Amino acid sequence: MIRQSPAQMYTAKQRGHTEDSLHRLLATFNFGAYADDTRNPFGSLAVVNDETLAPHNSISRNVGDATTLLIPLVGSLYYSLGAKEQVLMPGEALIISPFEKGTVLELKNPYDGDLVNYLFIVFRGIRTVNFGINRINLDVRNRLHGFVQQSVFGYMGIFDGRREALYNVKDSANGLFAFVINGSFEVNGRLLEERDALALWDTNEADIEALSENAIILLFEVPITRFTA
């Protein structure tokens, strides 16, 4: 039985919400104009945005002083860092190491009539993570697949209903952050619905059970030395 560890829930319906006809942003943590005392960064994990771009729309972000992670969920995403556009597809994750201050990342929806949905994630104050595209292999179901294995650890998995996984923390000083992309899960005895998130600390493991078919979860192990609940 998993010991009930300290935790904080971030429900999907309580996220910061900014939307117009071209772009929708749902922020798990404080971002832009969204500010809430209960939505401060979880240690080094500073930004978890669920964003949607309209056809042919683009946005720009300053990424100079942090490590940025992009994960397309629906549709491919074009990106550029002052050079030619490149494509990032579902099943891939782009890791952008800190650049010089003022470096701008541009994101674009290349489609004529389809929306693009992606996660925009930022880590601050961590050791350099190598730049590049990592494959997220979900061909094998009912297990967590690692796609970031450096100063932070990132995993994603697709599960059948009632299938389980146990994650063992690599460093007891780190915290765990779970984000449900699709379906619903129980994580250490706590129910998470689609796009809900859960932060855990003072724990050595996470017991994960899918409660629906084709449920998809994202899990990070991150340094939390500066985190206060």
Image: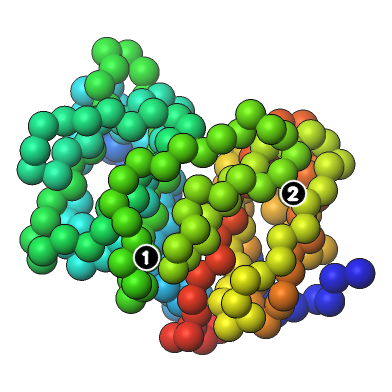
Q: Are marks 1 and 2 in contact (CB under 8 Å)?
A: no
Q: Position of residue 84 (x, y in %)?
A: 11, 32
Instruction: Check disc 1 and report the residue beneath it.
Output: 123
Residue 221 vertical placement versus 120 (above, below): below
Residue 70 vertical placement versus 68 (above, below): above
Residue 29 appears anywhere in the view: no
Please tell me whether mark 2 sits on a helix, a strand or a loop: strand
Alpha-carbon neighbours of circle 2 within 10 Å: few (<14), some, or many (≥20)? many
Give the left or right position of residue 65, taking residue 113 as reference: left
Please tell me whether mark 1 sits on a helix, a strand or a loop: strand
Alpha-carbon neighbours of circle 1 within 10 Å: few (<14), some, or many (≥20)? many
Q: In front here: 14 or 219?
A: 219
Tag 2: amino acid: Phe
Give the left or right position of residue 117, taking residue 132 as reference: right
Give the left or right position of residue 216, taking residue 116 as reference: right
Residue 217 vertical placement versus 166 (above, below): above
Number of callouts: 2
Q: How is the image coloured?
A: rainbow
Compute the Cα span from label 1 to label 2.
25 Å
Tag 1: amino acid: Phe
Residue at the location (52% across, 55% down)? 154
Q: Position of residue 203 (x, y in %)?
A: 71, 77
Instruction: Check disc 2 and report the residue beneath it.
Output: 185
Q: Position of residue 142 (x, y in %)?
A: 75, 39
Q: Position of residue 121 (x, y in %)?
A: 39, 55
Q: Quadrant of the C terminus?
A: bottom right
First in sequence: mark 1 vs mark 2: 1
Residue at the location (46% across, 37% down)? 135
